[in-house]
Image (cartoon, helix red, strand yellow):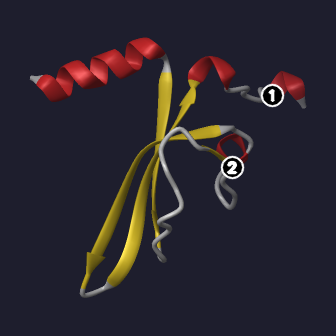
Amino acid sequence: MRAAQAKWDKLQRGVAEFSISLATGRADIYTETPVKVSGFKRVIDEQDWTISKVTHFLNNSGFTTSLELEVRLSDVEYETEDDE
């Protein structure tokens, strides 16, 4: 039930999420850091994302970092066919 409530709260805040795992760990990354990504759809690449969660892993595979990013949906600009 808590997971559903957390998801509902996030939707009410108008937030889109994006998760990515880094091949090499980055101990210098922390939450609330603004980031840009590249190599995805243009609408994703053009957004100013904020790190909402950082998880570091140290295991037999080495040191890796997993990130959860958020962007406020009100800040996202979509291009429509009329814009072309």
Kindly identify which residue carries mark 2: 36
Q: Where is residue 46 in the image (x, y as percent from the top left)?
A: 74, 42
Q: Which residue is drawn at 50% across and 68% down?
A: 26
Q: Position of residue 71 (x, y in %)?
A: 57, 31
Front position in the image: 24 or 82: 24
Q: Which residue is drawn at 37% across and 21% down?
A: 10
Kindly identify which residue carries mark 1: 81
Q: How far apart are marks 1 and 2 (CA)?
A: 25 Å
Q: Which amino acid does label 1 sit on?
A: Glu
Q: Residue at x 81, y 28 (%)?
A: 81
Q: Which amino acid does label 2 sit on?
A: Lys
Q: In which quadrant of the rendered image does the C terminus lie?
A: top right
Front position in the image: 72 or 82: 72
Q: Residues within 10 Å of mark 1 (few under 14, many from 20)?
A: few
Task: Tell me if label 1 and label 2 are in contact, CB under 8 Å.
Answer: no
Task: Indicate which disc, 1 or 2, sits on the residue closer to the N terminus.
Answer: 2
Image-quadrant location for residue 66: bottom left
Residue extending farthest to the top is 12
Q: How crowded is mark 2: few (under 14 residues within 10 Å), some or many (20 or more)?
A: few
Image side of residue 3 versus residue 12, left or right: left
Image side of residue 55 versus residue 52, left or right: left
